[in-house]
Amino acid sequence: MRALLFLVLFFLTGGLGTPCFAQNLEARLSEALSVPALVQAEVGALVVRNRDRKVLFDFRANRNFVPASNAKILTAVAALSHWGVAHRFTTMVESDKTPDSQGDVGELCLRGGGDPLLTSEEWWRLAADLRLKGLRGITGDVFLDASLFDKEAHHPFWGEVTDRAYHSGVVALATNYGAFQVVLAPIKSIGSRPQVLIDPSVPYLVPVNTAKMGGGLGSRLRVSRVKKENIEEVHVSGEMSLHSVPVSFYRNVADPVRYAGSVFKMHLAALQISIGGTVRVGKGECVQKLLAFHGQPLSLAVQRFLKWSNNNIGEMLIKGLGASRKGKPGTWAKGIEAAREEISRFGVDLNSAIWVDGSGLSRENRLSPRILVDILQRAQESTFFGAEFKSSLPIGGLDGTLKERLARGGAQIRAKTGMISGAMGLSGYAVGPGGDGLTFSVLINGQSASDDDIAIAIDNFVSILRE
């Protein structure tokens, strides 16, 4: 009977809105931000109840922080607002003439449309569609036209660019997010070289393997790539333990356009479509439309973007926005301006924000927890794209970048992670114990504790919203 009376009083008085509960929640959240891992850090946090926008917790919520990948929330909302969830980016294929009786054309031109999801599988589909159109051979050259975007492949505010996959270049005609996989498998013989497998296996990526098998318990391996005139060498060095299991490395390419061309050429050959000339970067002299290849819908692009925090997708969306709203070529400056205009349509005030790229890689970005919460609330209310946006966020303890985090909150927490050196954050949605929907953002900068300790502190803070 007492339990029933408590539940009746809980709901009649507004659940999370009861003064006692609200005070207890505020005290517990304050305590969660007072742990040793956060003592030396700059912290901002905001929790708002969705049904009446009541602020349940506010700690320096108006202060700007480096948001890291929490900036991806803005990019996703701007892209969905501009194009809509069903939009498909188009890659145009043209030739100098229609295929003759033998299925041959002289030149073939590919014109990139900024599709961020042109993976190896999509390139195979494009090549197969060309075969269905009757194409059997190209007697001349294949031209790769990436002029929809400018030639600045890396943002000037990213600092030193590495060959790690998350630093991949941004171009309008790409494949596999500008990256590739290297799998190293052990050979059971000391002094032998481990097996090197590159995916995709294209002649453009040439393995140079100097690594050796050793008898120790640990492996010390390095994988890098070196740009040559028409290829990129994939250098594998160090020592691999006999006791090791296969390990994977992901690296970006120095020339994403040529890399895309190599994948396309591979699929043409597999479908027995010959190329008499070479694959070149340029516009060519094509006047005949052969195929308008429509890629995967934007809803899927945003899902991969947010679930796995894919930087390349975000930057392609930003440059694509710039080209679509401000004209060719798409640039970061045009794209951010266009994205700000889209966000402003929702009544979100970005006057205090500093926003320079689509992924949050730059440390020049500055956002407040209040801006992030405001955008998140307005996004989920959108009948145009709200459902697709929310479903694209990682689910606590289940998938994406939260698969190994927030097990206590589980499926009742959907949020975007963020982490670069000296900055970490988590912003998204939670369902409170009374069933109330909550929107939250917590941003941490300047921490001296380990990344693991900071992540645990953030997760503990968010998990309280469920308890």
Image: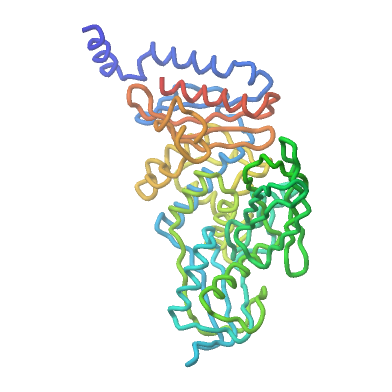
Q: What residue occupies the far left of the structure in this picture?
A: 1
Q: Is residue 173 above or below residue 443?
A: below
Q: Picture coordinates of residue 460 (x, y %)?
A: 52, 22
Q: Is residue 216 above or below residue 282?
A: above
User: Residue at the spot x=46%, y=20% of the render?
Assistant: 464
Q: Nearer the viewer, residue 295 or 11?
A: 295
User: Residue at the spot x=66%, y=41% of the render?
Assistant: 244
Q: Nearer the viewer, residue 240 or 199?
A: 240
135 lies left or right of 225: left
The quadrant holding residue 142 is bottom right
Q: Is residue 331 above or below residue 444?
A: below
Tell me how the rendering is colored: rainbow
Q: Picture coordinates of residue 315 (x, y %)?
A: 59, 53
Q: Picture coordinates of residue 144 (x, y %)?
A: 62, 73
User: Residue at the spot x=24%, y=6% of the render?
Assistant: 2
Point out the image quarter for the C terminus: top left
Q: Picture coordinates of residue 127 (x, y %)?
A: 50, 73
The quadrant holding residue 260 is bottom right
Q: What residue occupies the far front of the structure in this picture?
A: 189
Q: Is residue 54 above or below residue 68?
A: above
157 lies left or right of 93: right
Q: Nearer the viewer, residue 81 or 348?
A: 81
The quadrant holding residue 221 is top right
